Structure formats: structure tokens, C-alpha cells
């Protein structure tokens, strides 16, 4: 270029760079949040596509983040997808009805605060069975094969098998009910309805068909949660959405014929996954134990 000396070139390039930077601004926090949410939504679609290809009907998809935001508790993107696998459910419930707490088959698509890309977190069959004192390679393999089929559309690099740290006990809270099975279910639903910040998601009746009922006693799972409190607990610990949120209430008869209501100790779940137990999570756990412990044993007004 005529008239341009080497001495003036750096100045000219620097001016051009300044002009370019002057027209650039960092993405807004809202734009970054939307991009992260869109990335999670894309993988959720891949999970659902895999479910369709594997003939695993989606039972429930809970968008923790959007529900929490609506309840005034913003948190990072997180969605849990649950699918039904009748063969797996039959095999597992025959081995131990309490395994209903590990069902339906599920994965969590979330954006951990410490990572740049979304993560798809899942459990291994062996670790879930180990929680219940079972070592059964066939059942564990059945679970893992179904999980591989479910995630067939998801890049392997995004999938994380959640580690399970050894903990004392099984992390299951058990409350005996003075009512029969149907009355207990009705009371549980009534208690949930009384909580102004709580949402009922689904009631799953395992062994609902005559054929299945012949192989085991009725087992009912109630899925519910509080988006506001849950969002606060998950704000820095999205992994809680895999096993702790939503909450699961299992209703069945034990070996002695006693109707029992069983659910996860959320603090135990967090510790087993290597997470700190926050005051918010502790408060939710205490509320669950007290609310259902008192609600199941309270006397109902006599009918007229």
C-alpha cells in the first residue's frame, strides 16, 4: 500500500482492533442462561427420541428449572426424564418391592454450575441393587442394557454414571399406616394437596394388571415435589434432581401384612452421591418426615 510505512503499521492494526472491539459486547446473562437451557432441551429431545426407538414410553418429564423459576427459585437448567420398562419393573419388584423407589428408569439432563456443557447423569444397576442389599448381576445387567437403549441418541461424552459412596443403612424412611392400601393412598394424596407449594406429578400403580398382581402384592408410587424449596436446594447441586427430586412415596404391604409408606431420606441420598447436605435440603427432609408421619396417623373426623 502506497504511503504506509512499517513504523505506522502496528498503530494502524491497533486502531482497527479497537474499532472492532468497540462494536462487540459480551453476551448478556439472560442470553447465556437461554443458551444453557437450549443445550439441555436439545439433549432432553435426544433422550426422548431414544426412548421412542427403544419402545420405552416416557412416563414423566419434569423440568426442574422452569418450575422452580415460576415458583421464584431460579436454578440452572435441569430436567429428569422417566420411562417405563415393564419387563425391568416386573423383574426388579419380584426381587424386592422396595426397588420401586429406584423406578421408573430415569436420567437427569442438567447443567452443573462447575461445567461448561450439559451432563446426562444416570445410575448403574449394580449400585441401586447394592443399596437394598442385593447382588444380582442379571438384574443389574438388565437395568444397564435398558439404560444404554434409552441413551442411544445421546453422545457418550455427555453421559455420567453417578458414583455411589458407601453409607450406613439404606436411606429409606418407613412409616407404618393404620389404614388399608387404598385409604393410605387417599391420605397421602390428601396430605400432598394440603401443601400450598407442592405439585402432584404422577401416581404409578405397579402390578396393576391381573397377570402382574398374581406375581406380587400391589405396589403404588406417588411422585410429587415442591418446585420452590426444591429449586433452592438444587441451585448449587443439580444432581439432586436424579434421585431426590421429585420425591417418591412408596405404598405397599410389608412381609407381615402391615401397610407401610416408604420414601427416600434426602440427606442420605445427597451424602451417597458425594454432595454436601445444605440447610435447605435438611429442612425439606425434616418437613417430609414430620408432615407424613403426623398426617398418616391423625384421626379423621367421623362421617355423618
Image (cartoon, rainbow, N blue to C red):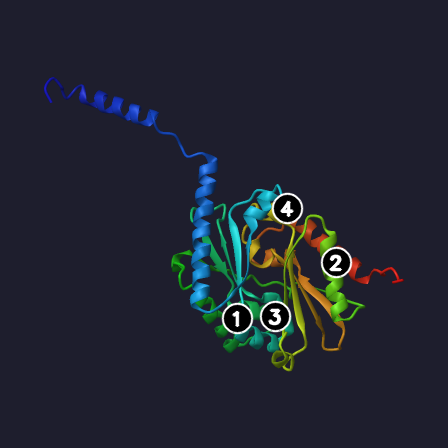
Where is residue 189? Give x, y as percent.
72, 60
Checking the image for residue 99, the label placed there is: 3
Question: In this rendering, would 137 be left or right of 265?
Answer: left
Tell me the CA gap for discs 1 and 4: 31 Å
Question: Residue 215's x, y, as percent?
Answer: 63, 81
* Discs 2/4, front: 2
User: What crowding class fits label 3: few (fewer than 14 Cα within 10 Å), some (14-19), or many (20 or more)?
Assistant: some
Are there few (<14), some (14-19), or many (20+) residues within 10 Å of tag 4? many
Q: What is the secondary structure assignment of the residue under circle 3?
A: helix
As measured in the structure, the alpha-carbon distance from the residue carrying label 2 to the one carrying label 3 is 25 Å
The image quadrant where one finds the N terminus is top left
The residue to which callout 4 is attached is 228
Residue annotated with mark 1:
85
- N-terminal-most mark, 3 or 1: 1
Q: Which residue is mark 2?
A: 190
Task: Describe the element under mark 1 as helix, strand or loop.
Answer: loop
Residue 228 visible in rendering: yes
Q: Residue at x 71, y 56 (%)?
A: 192
Quarter of the image with the C terminus is: bottom right
Q: Going 46% across and 60% down the picture, which residue do you hit?
A: 48
Look at the numbered discs 4 and 3 and tell me whether their residues touch, using CB distance below 8 Å: no
Q: Which one is in front in this view, the residue at disc 4 or the one at disc 3?
A: 4
What is the C-alpha distance between the residues marked 2 and 4? 20 Å
How far apart are the two marked residues, 3 and 1, measured between alpha carbons?
14 Å
Q: Earlier in the sequence, mark 2 or mark 4?
A: 2
Amino acid at each position: 500500500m502506497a504511503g504506509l510505512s512499517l513504523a505506522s503499521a502496528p498503530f494502524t492494526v491497533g486502531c482497527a482492533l479497537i474499532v472492532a472491539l468497540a462494536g462487540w459486547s459480551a453476551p448478556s446473562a439472560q442470553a447465556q442462561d437461554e443458551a444453557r437451557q437450549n443445550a439441555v432441551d436439545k439433549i432432553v429431545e435426544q433422550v426422548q427420541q431414544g426412548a421412542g426407538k427403544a419402545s420405552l414410553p416416557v412416563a414423566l418429564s419434569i423440568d426442574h428449572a422452569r418450575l422452580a423459576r415460576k415458583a421464584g427459585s431460579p436454578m440452572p437448567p435441569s430436567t429428569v426424564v422417566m420411562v417405563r420398562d415393564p419387563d425391568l419393573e416386573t423383574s426388579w419388584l419380584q426381587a424386592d418391592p422396595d426397588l420401586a423407589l429406584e423406578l421408573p428408569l430415569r436420567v437427569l439432563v442438567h447443567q452443573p454450575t462447575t461445567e461448561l456443557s450439559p451432563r446426562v447423569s444416570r445410575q448403574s444397576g449394580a449400585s441401586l441393587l447394592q443399596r437394598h442389599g442385593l447382588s444380582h448381576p442379571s438384574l443389574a445387567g438388565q437395568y444397564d442394557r435398558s439404560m444404554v437403549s434409552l441413551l442411544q441418541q445421546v453422545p457418550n461424552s455427555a453421559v455420567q454414571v453417578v458414583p455411589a459412596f458407601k453409607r450406613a443403612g439404606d436411606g429409606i424412611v418407613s412409616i407404618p399406616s393404620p389404614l388399608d392400601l387404598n385409604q393410605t393412598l387417599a391420605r397421602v394424596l390428601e396430605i400432598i394437596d394440603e401443601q400450598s407449594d407442592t405439585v402432584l406429578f404422577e401416581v404409578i400403580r405397579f402390578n396393576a394388571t391381573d397377570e402382574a398382581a398374581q406375581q406380587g402384592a400391589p405396589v403404588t408410587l406417588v411422585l410429587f415435589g415442591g418446585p420452590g424449596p426444591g429449586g433452592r436446594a438444587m441451585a448449587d447441586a443439580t444432581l439432586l434432581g436424579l434421585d431426590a427430586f421429585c420425591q417418591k412415596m412408596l405404598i405397599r404391604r410389608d412381609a407381615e401384612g402391615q401397610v407401610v409408606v416408604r420414601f427416600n431420606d434426602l440427606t442420605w441420598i445427597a451424602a451417597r452421591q458425594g454432595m454436601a447436605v445444605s440447610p435447605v435440603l435438611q429442612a425439606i427432609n425434616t418437613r417430609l418426615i414430620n408432615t407424613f408421619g403426623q398426617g398418616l396417623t391423625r384421626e379423621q373426623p367421623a362421617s355423618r
